[in-house]
């Protein structure tokens, strides 16, 4: 059942095998055994991959729900044995540059709560049991998730570059040779241009899957990156980066998306109260 769920979700036996830590042939055998026992097909070809049939999708949803219940039950047992815990998912950059350096403050306030962190990119919406997912760009999230989002803090974005990098503003046009962008949140540049009333003109573009890579490339002097002010605070203070146009707030703000189908635990409520306070001071 785990092999079926992973294959249906990922659309690939190879990716399912990698996630489950099994071989391609082992996952294929399990799916064939399920289909033989059912007496009908659970998957069909879709381009270079596969996709579940209607029956396969129905079974996948049932299995996914059962796995979620098992995960929740296991976590409840762990909490009873070890004390309260909280699983938080967020971007690697936010975790490394803001959350982890300040997490001691949460532990001082709530010493009995254990926080587990998972790194997730902006395109990764599958929570894998996380109690809270922290994200500012929620445009690709399902509507139900967007409705459940709990505001945490305002965010402000601005173009940054290495000192001396040629970026100029004239006649409402920001000009640079190379734009640096996040592969999965490229709309950030559109939002900034609309808020700033400026148009960006560039001749080349560099795309990266993680924000911390965008930061490092900007520091190296290869282009102009659009970044949230908290993520580059230390680099600006140290003179490794400059912000030629300052920073502008984005309406969406940072929010916590709680897991569907379960109430906020006392640990989750405590974490939200702490992070809202901590971010409000910066």
Image (spheres, rainbow, N blue to C red):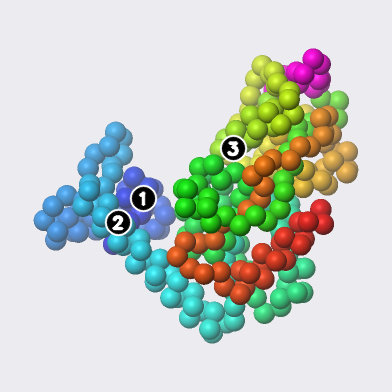
| Neighbourhood count class around disc 1 (C-alpha, 10 Å): few under 14, some 14–19, many 20 upward | some
Q: How many marks?
A: 3
Residue drawn at (32%, 51%), measured in percent from left and top?
Answer: 7
Looking at marks 2 and 1 on the same chain, the residue that comes earlier in the sequence is marked by 1
Residue 90, picture quadrant: bottom right
Residue 28 visible to the viewer: no
Q: Is residue 227 rendered to the left or right of residue 235?
A: left
Looking at marks 3 and 1 on the same chain, the residue that comes earlier in the sequence is marked by 1
Segment tinted magenta in the rendering: 166-178
From this view, report whether residue 119 is shown above or below residue 183. below
Residue toward you, 53 or 147 = 147
Q: Label 2, on which residue?
A: 60
Measure the C-alpha gap from mark 3 to mark 1: 22 Å
Residue drawn at (28%, 44%), measured in percent from left and top?
Answer: 51
Q: Label 3, on which residue?
A: 185
Residue toward you, 129 or 267 = 267
């Amino acid at each position: 059942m785990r092999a079926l769920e992973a294959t249906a979700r990922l659309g690939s036996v190879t990716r399912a095998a990698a996630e489950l830590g099994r071989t391609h042939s082992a996952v294929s055998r399990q799916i064939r055994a399920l289909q033989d026992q059912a007496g009908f097909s659970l998957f069909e070809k879709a381009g270079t991959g596969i996709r579940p049939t209607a029956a396969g999708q129905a079974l996948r949803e049932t299995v996914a729900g059962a796995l979620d219940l098992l995960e929740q039950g296991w976590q409840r047992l762990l909490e009873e044995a070890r004390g309260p815990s909280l699983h938080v998912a967020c971007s690697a950059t936010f975790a490394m540059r803001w959350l982890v350096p300040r997490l001691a403050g949460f532990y001082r306030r709530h010493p009995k709560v254990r926080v587990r962190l998972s790194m997730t990119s902006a395109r990764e919406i599958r929570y894998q049991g996380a109690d809270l997912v922290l994200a500012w760009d929620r445009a690709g999230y399902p509507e139900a998730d967007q409705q459940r989002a709990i505001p945490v803090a305002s965010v402000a974005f601005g173009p940054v570059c290495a000192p001396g990098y040629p970026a100029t503003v004239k006649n409402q046009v920001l000009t640079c040779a190379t734009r640096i962008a996040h592969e999965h949140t490229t709309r950030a540049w559109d939002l900034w241009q609309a808020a700033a009333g400026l148009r960006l003109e560039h001749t080349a573009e560099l795309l990266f899957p993680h924000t911390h890579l965008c930061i490092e490339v900007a520091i190296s002097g290869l282009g102009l990156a659009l970044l949230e002010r908290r993520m580059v605070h230390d680099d600006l203070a140290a003179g490794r980066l400059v912000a030629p146009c300052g920073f502008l707030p984005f309406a969406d703000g940072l929010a916590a998306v709680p897991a569907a189908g379960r109430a906020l635990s006392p640990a989750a409520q405590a974490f939200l109260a702490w992070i809202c306070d901590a971010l409000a001071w910066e």
